[in-house]
Amino acid sequence: MQAPFTTLTGFRAILQALPQPDAEAIAAAEARNAQLTKPAGALGRLEELAIWYAGWRGNGRPRLERSQVVIFAGNHGVAARGVSAFPPEVTTQMVGNFKAGGAAINQLSKTFGAVMSVVPLELDRPTEDFTEAPAMTEEELVAALAAGWEAVDGDTDLFITGEMGIGNTTSAAAVACGLFGGSAADWTGRGSGVDDGGLSLKTRVVEAGLSLHAEALSDPLEVLRRLGGREVAAMTGAIARARVSRIPVILDGFICCASAAVLQALAPDALDHAVAGHASREGAHRALLQKLGKEPLLDLGLRLGEASGAVLALSVLKAAIDCHSGMATFEEAGVSGG
Ligand SMILES: O=C(O)c1ccc[n+]([C@@H]2O[C@H](COP(=O)([O-])O)[C@@H](O)[C@H]2O)c1
Ligand SMILES: Cc1cc2nc[nH]c2cc1C
């Protein structure tokens, strides 16, 4: 579906009129949950997950049959500053690997039956180095938001987005710092594996970006335009599209959550359709999840990105829905209630 906005004003307006989950489906799911053959609350967070999912799908006894995973890839001008453990050409090389089926996310998507695709965003035209200029023009930001929006299949039951972009933990740290304040050091981490020297350089780079753009950071979309990147913005657009179509989302790691945070800053309920898939090993991911008010489903020490943690969490969500929709009630099974 073509994005229903061609300007940032248009994108902003969409976020001011978001649909809510279906209250009747939530009530039906709660009633069903109370009758299932288990002590009340014994399935812990699985119960909340199933009821949350039922609300967004508008069905008190939902199914999860079609999951979509989209990986957005972008290159960052700021990568030339030496903020990553890997050279910038790895972004394009990994896109080749995704297309050939050789990356972790290809295997994980296969394991959990998700349809995965990759969307490279002008890889031969990196964003501007945000320590010197805004990363993107307004037109470039709108194009990236629209690319994200248009990548979502309106018929999917669940949406997951991830990214590939050398330098993007620097960009995501700057976006998080721009949105939430604090010092650059609060938001920077080792990304793809920089050493102590790399981490202190990266922190100085984030500081320089924040200081250059300090006067313009009260608007979350300006934070995204000045400090973000194409794949960061595409994830923002995709998560927004899923919200508008009432498609539940599982968030991935640090970069994905920085993209999502922009939406929350624009509309406080914009992420009600999203759960946090996992806690990444990236230093500031937990702090970011706290700002989003999200408790991660998994904590496996991952720091890969490319939607890997979110797709692993899909297994938990699927299990929750299968229990909710497949279990017998006390009456059906002839089991005495407590
Ligand atoms: O998802 C995460 O939390 C995460 C944490 C560390 C690294 N990454 C991945 O590593 C790349 C960014 O690392 P860097 O050091 O180049 O900024 C990018 O392709 C991300 O997918 C992702
Ligand atoms: C090899 C490699 C694979 C990745 N996948 C997601 N981010 C990545 C970063 C690197 C460096």
Image (cartoon, grey):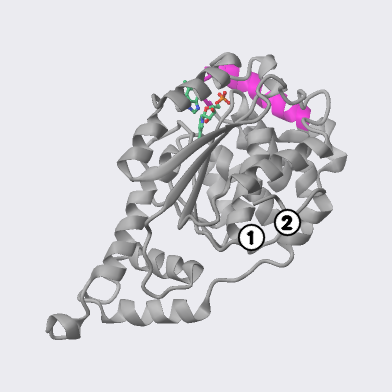
Q: Which residues are magenta?
A: 190-209
- Mark 1: C-beta under 8 Å from nearest atom of ligand 1: no
Would you place residue 328 above or below residue 170 in this image? below
Dot 1: few (<14), some (14–19), or many (≥20) neighbours within 10 Å? Answer: many
Q: Identify the mark at residue 270; answer none if there is no mark.
A: 1
Residue 27, position as x, y percentages in the image? 44, 81
Residue 167, position as x, y percentages in the image? 62, 24
Name the residue type under label 2.
Leu
Write the residue at 29% across / 58% down.
Answer: 319
Write the residue at 40% across / 63% down.
Answer: 49
Name the residue type under label 1.
Ala
Residue 310, position as x, y percentages in the image? 44, 45
Would you place residue 42 above or below residue 23 in this image? above
Would you place residue 29 above or below residue 269 in this image? below
Q: Identify the mark at residue 304; answer none if there is no mark.
A: none
Q: CA distance from mark 1 to mark 2?
A: 8 Å
Instruction: Give the quadrant of residue 72.
Output: top right
Instruction: Give the quadrant of residue 172.
Output: top right
Write the residue at 33% across / 53% down.
Answer: 316
Q: Identify the mark at residue 266; answer none if there is no mark.
A: 2
User: Majority secondary structure of the magenta segment?
Assistant: helix
Question: Which part of the image, by quadrant, shows the C terminus?
Answer: bottom left
> In the current view of this chain or complex, which residue is farthest to the right?
215
* 268, 93: nearer the viewer: 93
Tell me if 7 is positioned left or right of 245 in this view. Answer: right
